[in-house]
Amino acid sequence: MASLFSKIVKGEVPCYKVAENDSFLAFLDIMPVKEGHVLVVPKLEIDYIFDIEDDLIGEMMIFAKSIAKKIEKVFPCNRVGVTVIGLEVPHAHVHLIPIDKLDDMNFSKPKLNLSDAQLTEIAQKLFVA
């Protein structure tokens, strides 16, 4: 069965797209821990990040780096944090989150509830950054 992220990649489920190339898609997390929280996924459906072929995982990190630079422009922060949890959706992905302190990446905190308008605005800002 296709993962939620595979359905997003195929356009079967809408997303707030930030960037895309032939191999990867970056989109906003709709339940972010902080504004500017982006998910980067390979277009191939691979469950576990460490099952990604070496060359592709390298390309994924280069793609993620380009998104992190956009996040830094739009959301001034000390760093863009990167985390891989991999339990929520059975499709390899990385979280990119603008952070000023470690607690900004605390996934046990309540998630933000942003409106469609807010998510659309954030995605547009990141897309053009």
Image: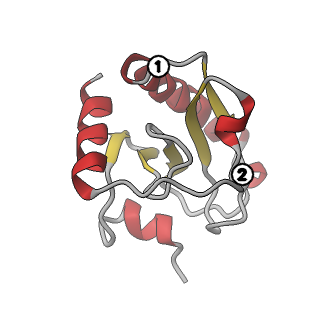
Residue 101, horizontal then vertical, whole percent: 69, 26
Location of residue 22 in the rendering, given as x and y in whole percent from the top left corner: 39, 43
User: Where does label 1 land, which residue?
Assistant: 72
Which mark is in front, 1 or 2? Answer: 1
**Left or right, residue 51 beside residue 8:** right
* Residue at image mark 2: 49
- Element class at badge 2: helix
- Indicate the quadrant containing the N terminus: top left, top right, bottom left or bottom right: bottom right
Q: Amino acid at mark 1?
A: Glu
Give the percent coordinates (x, y) of residue 14: 30, 64
* Residue in the picture at 52% in, 41% down: 34
Where 99 falls versus 26 (above or below)?
above
Q: Say whether residue 119 is left or right of residue 62.
A: left
Say which residue appears at 56% left-offset and 26% top-offset.
62
Q: How is the image coloured?
A: secondary structure
Decide which of tag 1 and tag 2 comes sooner along the chain: 2
74 on left or right of 32: left
